[in-house]
Amino acid sequence: MTQTTLQNTLYKRMPTPEDLNAMARDLHFHPVHNDQPSVLTIDEIDTFNREGYLKGFKIYSDDEISNIRQEFDGIIETVLARGDHNYSIISAHLKSRMVYDIVKDPRIVEYISDLLGEDVVCWGAHFFCKLPGDGKIVAWHQDASFWPLSPSRTVTAWLAIDDADTENACMRFVATSHHDGHLTYQKSSEGENNVLNQTVEEVSLYGTSVDVELKAGEISLHSDLLLHGSELNRSDRRRCGLTLRYCAAAVRADLDWNKEGVIVKGTDPTGHWADLPRPAVDNV
């Protein structure tokens, strides 16, 4: 699957490098200031500010995540049967009632709100499903580099649908790399077999790499400026995660990306985000 093929599965238009270069984006880390968090501790907020991520929060019980996994099994079977790719399930909150409900689940939103404030929007949900032997990596990259959003105040919740460990290519973070702002990247070569199209090189200059092992039903949280990626899945087990993209409602989105927003807590006083309703039917 080429990057163009992946982009064409989106409802929203993916920006070109020229689009992004023309935008006056604020791509600097904005530390969290919250002395009365709801579910996080002050130490955890300090850790997020320092390291750029948190991990290992149990959201769903074994029975709950089993039911979510069973529904995803049906989704991925349908997607593959019609000839689409296992990485093509993007904007899933607009296509799946299950995903929409996950996006708005207070058990996740409260963690996000502790980091982003009382007015929170979810504007994206994407299944990253690494099948055994699919030959794909996700090269080192920063999420904010791809997005026409400003300022840089998006936090991703990565929900483990399956157990994710070093054997089946769990995510890896470069701790503290978010402090370096927007980093120079290279366009990925075909030989990299990268799901995305950007590669940041010499990442050891920016921090220490950390394996983000999660049990199914757990989430990690990371800044949109944190370097991260994942290796080949060399195991005989699938590794699926659902990325949920949340931002402060004050963030501005260009290229109509605001049209995919859902207010998950508080309000959007300016009416910038569409606040879409739950899908009436599933259409993944």
Image (cartoon, rainbow, N blue to C red):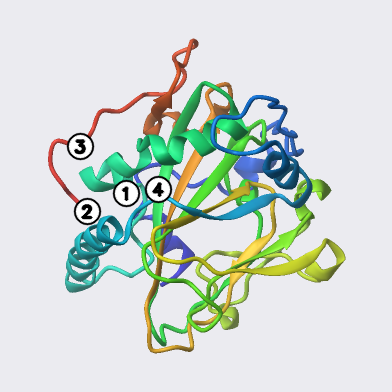
Q: Residues within 10 Å of mark 4 (few under 14, many from 20)?
A: many
The CA span between labels 2 and 1 is 7 Å
Res 125 label: 4
Q: Is disc 4 in contact with disc 3, using a CB cutoff of under 8 Å?
A: no
Q: Which residue in the rendered view is the most extreme toward the top?
A: 269
Q: Is disc 1 in contact with disc 3, using a CB cutoff of under 8 Å?
A: no
Write down the residue under mark 2: 284
- Mark 3 falls on what kind of element? loop
Res 92 label: 1
Report the amino acid beneath label 4: Ala
Which quadrant holds the N terminus? Answer: bottom left
The CA span between labels 1 and 3 is 10 Å
Q: Residue at x 66, y 36 (%)?
A: 152
Q: Is disc 4 in contact with disc 1, using a CB cutoff of under 8 Å?
A: yes
Query: Where in the figure is residue 233, as x and y percent of width and height?
Result: 48, 82
Res 279 label: 3
Report the amino acid beneath label 1: Ala
- Mark 2 falls on what kind of element? loop
Q: Residue at x 79, y 54 (%)?
A: 176
Q: Residue at x 75, y 34 (%)?
A: 31
Res 282 label: none
In this rendering, position of residue 156 left or right of residue 237: right
Report the amino acid beneath label 3: Pro
The CA span between labels 4 and 1 is 5 Å
Q: Nearer the viewer, residue 163 or 58?
A: 58
Query: Where in the figure is residue 101, as x and y percent of width and height?
Result: 28, 40
Q: Which numbered disc flags the more N-terminal residue, 4 or 3?
A: 4
Q: Residue 24's quadrant in the figure?
A: top right
Q: Is disc 2 in contact with disc 1, using a CB cutoff of under 8 Å?
A: yes
The CA span between labels 3 and 2 is 11 Å
